Amino acid sequence: MTGLKGHAGGVTFHGVFNGDASDLFVSVHLPEGIDTKPEILRPYIAYAERRLIWEYVRVHGRLPVCNSE
C-alpha cells in the first residue's frame, strides 16, 4: 500500500496503521439480481456501504476507525 490519495478510507488506514495489513479483515458483498446499469448500481453501492457502517455502529457504538463520516 502506498497511502496515495484517492480513497479516504485507504489514506486513513495508511496513516493510522502505517500500511500494515497483517491483521486486516476483508469482507465482500456480492449482491444477486442487482441491475449493473450505473444509475442503479451506484445508489445500491452507496446504500450497502451506509448500511454496513450503521450495523457496525450499532454493535460497537462508534464509527469504524477508517470511516470518519
Image (tube, rainbow, N blue to C red):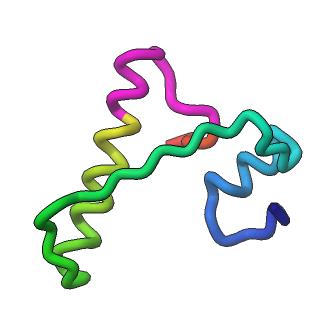
Please name the residue shown 79% across and 69% down the image.
4
For the N terminus, the image quarter is: bottom right
Q: Is residue 19 above or below residue 57?
A: below
Image quadrant in which you'd find residue 18:
top right
Camera-nearest residue between 35 and 44? 35
Depicted 17 relative to depicted 12: above or below? above
Q: Residue 68: percent from the left, percent from the top?
A: 57, 40
Task: State yes or no: residue 55 in magenta.
Answer: yes
Based on the picture, tell me whether residue 6 belongs to the magenta stretch.
no
Horizontally, residue 64 falls left or right of residue 13, namely left
Q: With 5 as the anchor, is 58 left or right in this view?
A: left
> Where does the image place residue 35, in percent across and percent down from the top left?
14, 75
Tell me where residue 49 appears, x and y as whole percent. Answer: 36, 50
Residue 28: percent from left, percent from top: 42, 51
Q: Nearer the viewer, residue 42 or 22?
A: 22
Q: Which residues are magenta?
A: 54-65
- Please say if 36 is above or below 55: below
- The residue lying furthest to the right in this view is 18
Q: Quadrant of residue 7?
A: bottom right
**What residue is drawn where x is 34% and y is 32%?**
54
